[in-house]
Amino acid sequence: MRELSSYSCVLLLVVLALSAGSCYGFGTFGFDIHHRYSDPVKQILAVDELPAKGSPEFYSAMVHRDKIIKGRRLATANDQTPVTFLDGNETYRLDDLGFLHYANVSIGTPAVSFLVALDTGSDLFWLPCDCSKCVRGLKTSDNQMIEFNIYSLNSSNTSSKVPCSSALCEQQKQCSSPQSNCPYEVLYLSNGTSSTGVLVEDVLHLTTDEDKTKAVEAKITFGCGQTQTGSFLNGAAPNGLFGLGMDNVSVPSILANENLASNSFSMCFGVDGVGRITFGDRGSSGQGETPFNLRQSHPTYNVSITQVNVGGNTADLDFNAIFDSGTSFTYLNDPAYTLISENFNNFATEKRHTSNSSGLPFEYCYDLSANQTSFNYPIVNLTMKGGDYFFVNDPIIVISLQGGDVYCLGIVKSDNVNIIGQNFMTGYRIVFDRERMVLGWKASDCYDIEASNTLPVNPPTAVPPAIAVNPEATSGNANNTNISGASPSITSPSRHLKTLFYALTFALIPFFALI
């Protein structure tokens, strides 16, 4: 995801709190990330009357959300062990909230927890804070109330406002004096969408990622979001945004500058929606790598692609793309979009879906017959600058229509920048190494990171249509080497479940109204 002005942002989500303890130490830090339709989350969130996921309206909403949120300025020591959030390194991909990954973070003293969206396309971490205009909670379909945690400077013993004299204050021209509180403003492409407030400093509670026995209290700078407008009052990042970009104000940059972690982090995107994030992770042997392109005035995780392979047909094509965890799907402009899409279409065996009334945001979709349990589709692979291969494990999306199911190539035609979204990163541990300025990737199931990094990820299974959500939202103030393989049966992958952890904090915005 990307913003227009000084800081950045991502998409939606919900809340709830986990208690957090504190002690001292340092190392590498991580936490789990989860998708709304992962098996663990579905077990916890057994909600009656769930609408069927996978509808054209659902995917159109995700694409619309991507287009609204993107558009910003596109923009340690060897003995340290990786660290993650104190509440755990698990992350959750929430399909209903944009196919993005979220994690639970603990801030302040005493610690307060927030479920925040994770965005490598944004820099500033911000939370709803002492807000005059923000989302304060959710109302379930049966009129039960779920309140969000709202950060408050007065409620934390370790909080302080950041003065305009700080090197992290980018709005110094708006300051009356060096001692004034540093303001921030995030503007988005969506008309009237913004987050404004002041920069604050407080403790982010972390723990070592390996044995979870050493806690670290990291002093970080983030945005106290006092006023949210536009899309932020209609479901976009209602409980905060965790920026992971390259700017000095991003949390990975702060952790590195404070010598709490190496200047590198990883995100793992599991096929079942459960992932991991680890700060200080510099990757592992045997991973694929490609250098970042840093020609822009505002550096991003931009890489070069030199070849594309669709269904075994390889073509030379040199273009740049940003790896952005804050974008749901993959967005390509021409000639990359046409080359990949038309080759995919040439190798697809099912009849192309031609109905103009479906409202699908994807151009290349194919009809599945009734009771069809398996189908083949062309594999999409990329060759990165330097020669390493990036095999796309999850290039398709299965969607349920009134007349039957279809599967679509999960690429949307872009009118500007090329973005590799979360759907293309599925099945990989992606390493954003800002010390060596390289992107790394290795196949992983995201459970036992070290063990799974040595195992290949099988060609993806096509997941049957899941549950789609059309929420009523109201605002309130107060390496796999298969080159031309095909997917097997339409089955949902089974994974190791960690039900207890998931049970602690989930409420889903698609089933609720914002209050």
Image: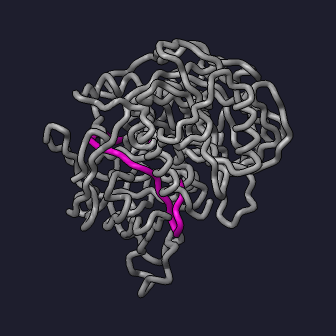
**Is there any visible trace of residue 147 in the rendered image?**
yes
**Residue placed at 34% from the left, 38% from the top?**
469
**Residue placed at 57% from the left, 54% from the top?**
245
Tell me the quarter of the picture where residue 23 sits: top left
Above or below, comparing residue 294 to residue 289 in the picture: below
Does 94 appear in magenta? no
**Is there any visible trace of residue 24 in the rendered image?**
no
Percent across and percent down for residue 88 are 41, 34
Q: Is residue 61 left or right of residue 330?
A: left
Q: What colour scheme governs how the chains and residues are painted in the rendered image of this protein?
A: one colour
Does 8 appear in magenta? yes
Which region shows up in magenta?
1-26
**Residue placed at 30% from the left, 61% from the top?**
129
Comparing 24 with 386, the one in front is 386
Above or below, comparing residue 275 to residue 140 in the picture: above
Percent across and percent down for residue 177 are 43, 86
